[in-house]
Structures are given as C-alpha cells and as structure tokens.
C-alpha cells in the first residue's frame, strides 16, 4: 500500500469522528479533531517525505503548533495572549509559504504577461478587505472566542478601543495574508500550468473558502452542515498542500514561456 493511502485512512477516520461529535453537539471535541488535521499531516510529511522543502516544513510546523496552541486550557488572564500568539503564528506560517512559492516566480516576466489579471485581482482584494474592515458583523467576529476575556470599559459594555483596534488590525493582516497566498498561488498556476501548481492553488482556495464560512458563523456553530463543510475544506486544502509538497519537480515543467 502506498504511503498516501495510510494518510487517507487516518483522515477518513478523523472525518468520521468529527461528524459524530458534531451530531452529538460535542463541539469541544469536534474542534479538537479539527486542530489535529494539520499536525497529523505534518507528522506524516516529516516521517515519510525524504526530500523535504524547508519553507513548506516551516509552514506546516508553525501552523500545527498554532492550532494546538488554541486548545491549551489556560487561565482567563492568558486567553487573550493565546489569541494573539496563535494568530501571529498562523500569519507567520502563511508568510513562509508565500515566500517559498513567490521566490520561484519571475515577476518581471509574469506581470507584463498577466497584467490585466493582476489588476483585477488587486481590485477584488481591495474590495474584500474594505468590506471586512468596515462591516459591522466582522467586528463581532473578531471577539467570538474571547467574549469573557476582553477588558471592558467601566461605563460601557463595548471593549476598550485599544483592544478593539488591536484585534481588528490583527484580523485585517491575517485576511490580507490569506488573500495574498491565494493570489500568489493563482499567479503561480498561470505561470507554470502543471499539476503541482494546480494542487497549491486548490489548497489555497479551500483555505480561503473555509475562512469565508467562519465569517458567516460563530464557530463552533449549531449549523452542523456549515461546520462539516468548513472541516472538509480545511482537510482537502491541507491534503492538496501535502500533495503539492511531495509531487516531484520535473525538468521542463510547462510554463507560459514554453507555449509561446
């Protein structure tokens, strides 16, 4: 049996456990299972992959530690710190992946070739970020995991402006980094047009869609189907990332230079 088959069996079992815990409204356990997805893939990658990619290894390790860090049972005083540390690690993980992918893209040749596409992407990203920044429901989302830990004003029920702006800024940077990853992976696919770049793009797309769903619900939610979809998107996304990393880089990969 190929090594990938063992990973698929493990992920299938975790998926079954997740659906079961969701149906039983055991949201803490379903959240814990979600947090195990990336660490399981990371361990499997470190053990089975002989030719590891440094930036991808760093990405997986940072992301895994950040996910596990959110499950640590800490005192009320440290929950706010946990929120910041875990999100900063998520951001750092994405930056490593963006750097690793973008360094192999000759932007001087790609930008003139796909200038209209890049302009459209920039406009779409600006529109999305503007709506996330200005929309009222997104401000409520920022504190979905910290309702009892944010310092309150003595005269108001709302969080202090300093804490609010810090959270908004952190979430804005996080969303910006995720969108940059999606754009870089898409440009990488336009440039190379091969299976490996397609896997990276599909993985990035799944991660972005999972983030969009989490903006629509307070996770974990009573809407089980949305939680399951979000879980599957994360699972498929990181499985694609894993396949991207183990897929061999062949000489003469197809790029727009080879088809001109």
Image: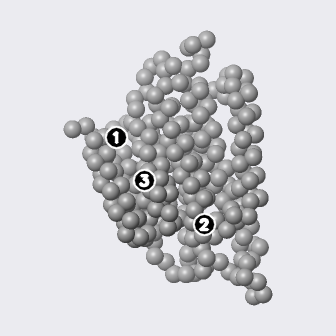
Q: CA distance from mark 1 to mark 2?
A: 32 Å
Which quadrant is the N terminus positioned in? Answer: top left
Residue topped by disc 3: 38
Above or below residue 105? Residue 71 is: below
Could you tell me residue 32's position as x and y percent?
41, 65
Q: CA distance from mark 3 to mark 1?
A: 16 Å
Residue topped by disc 2: 84
Q: Is residue 4 left or right of residue 22?
A: left
Which quadrant is the C terminus positioned in? Answer: top right
Q: Secondary structure at mark 1?
A: loop
User: In front: mark 2 or mark 3?
Assistant: 3
Kindly identify the residue that appears in the image at 70 percent across and 29 percent down.
Answer: 117
In this view, the residue in front, 31 or 177, is 31
Sequence order check: which comes first, mark 2 or mark 3?
3
Sequence order check: which comes first, mark 1 or mark 2?
1
Q: Is residue 141 left or right of residue 115?
A: left
Q: Is residue 55 visible?
A: no
Marks 1 and 3: in contact by CB < 8 Å? no
Above or below residue 171? Residue 6 is: above
Q: Is residue 125 left or right of residue 69?
A: right
Kindly identify the residue that appears in the image at 70 percent across and 37 percent down.
Answer: 121
Q: Residue furthest bottom?
A: 154
In this view, the residue in front, 61 or 134, is 134
């Amino acid at each position: 049996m190929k090594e990938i088959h063992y990973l698929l069996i493990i992920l299938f079992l975790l998926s079954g456990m997740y659906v079961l815990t969701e149906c039983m409204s055991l949201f803490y356990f379903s959240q814990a299972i979600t947090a195990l997805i990336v660490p399981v893939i990371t361990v499997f990658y470190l053990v089975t992959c002989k030719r590891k990619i440094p930036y991808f290894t760093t990405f997986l390790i940072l992301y895994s530690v950040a996910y596990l860090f959110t499950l640590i049972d800490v005192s009320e005083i440290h929950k706010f710190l946990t929120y910041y540390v875990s999100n900063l690690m998520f951001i750092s993980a994405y930056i490593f992946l963006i750097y690793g992918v973008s360094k192999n893209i000759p932007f001087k040749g790609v930008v003139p070739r796909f200038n209209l596409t890049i302009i459209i992407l920039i406009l779409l990203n600006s529109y999305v970020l503007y709506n996330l920044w200005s929309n009222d429901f997104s401000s409520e989302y920022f504190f979905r995991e910290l309702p009892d830990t944010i310092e309150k004003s003595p005269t108001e029920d709302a969080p202090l402006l300093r804490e609010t702006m810090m959270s908004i800024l952190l979430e804005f940077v996080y969303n910006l980094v995720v969108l940059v990853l999606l754009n870089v992976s898409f440009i990488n696919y336009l440039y190379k047009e091969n299976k490996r770049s397609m896997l990276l793009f599909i993985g990035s797309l799944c991660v972005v869609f999972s983030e969009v769903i989490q903006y629509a619900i307070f996770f974990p939610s009573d809407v089980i189907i949305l939680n399951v979809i979000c879980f599957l998107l994360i699972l498929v996304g990181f499985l694609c990332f894993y396949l991207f990393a183990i897929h061999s880089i062949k000489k003469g990969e197809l790029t727009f230079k080879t088809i001109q």
